[in-house]
Image (cartoon, helix red, strand yellow):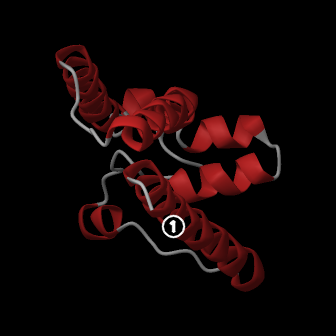
Amino acid sequence: MNNQKIRLKKLLILTALILGSGIAYYLFIRFTGFAVPCIIYKSTGLYCITCGITRMFVALFSLDFVAAAKNNILVLTLLAPAIIFAIYKAVKYVKTGQLRLTKPQKIIILLVLLLSIAFMVLRNLPQLSFLAPI
């Protein structure tokens, strides 16, 4: 089996595991009504960067875009570019076997990280409580 086929097989297995886990968790939530609570929120009372993501995805699967945005507007906004970037990197990996990030990609990821930290701080300010998950 050539290298491209091996890399594609690995990528498909990883994708199936990630999607399968997500679907299983979604079904678990839908049938039991129980979701894993945020450890940061439980221990500090502060909303982290990812607070509201589970409810955001549940709302997305129900096509309730307003509720999805109210739960985590940052992740919702970054979701499409992140998926496009992941697909781009996956195709490049299958073709070349390389996963290295370019300097511009590293800068963009750093900016997204800084934006995420700023979002976490802002969503915990009383004046910006609309950024907190519903």
Describe the element under mark 1 as helix, strand or loop.
helix
Q: Nearer the viewer, residue 1 or 58?
A: 1
Residue found at the far bottom of this picture:
32
Image quarter for residue 21? bottom right
Q: Is residue 48 above or below residue 6?
A: above
Image quarter for residue 69? top right
Residue found at the far front of this picture:
1
Q: Position of residue 117 (x, y in %)?
A: 25, 34
Which amino acid lies under the numbered mark 1 shown in the image of this protein?
A: Ile
Q: Position of residue 17 (x, y in %)?
A: 52, 70
> On the rendered structure, is 80 left or right of 42?
right
Residue at image coords 50%, 61%: 9
Q: Is residue 21 above or below residue 72?
A: below
Q: Position of residue 70 (x, y in %)?
A: 62, 38
> On the rendered structure, is 101 left or right of 29?
left
Residue at image coords 34%, 31%: 119
Image quarter for residue 127? top left
Residue found at the far right of this picture:
63
Image quadrant in which the N terminus is located? bottom left
Q: Residues within 10 Å of mark 1 (few under 14, many from 20)?
A: few
Residue at image coords 46%, 38%: 86
Number of labelled discs? Answer: 1
The residue beneath circle 1 is: 13
Q: Is residue 80 above or below residue 17?
A: above
Residue at image coords 31%, 43%: 97
Q: Nearer the viewer, residue 52 or 18?
A: 18
Q: Nearer the viewer, residue 122 or 85?
A: 85
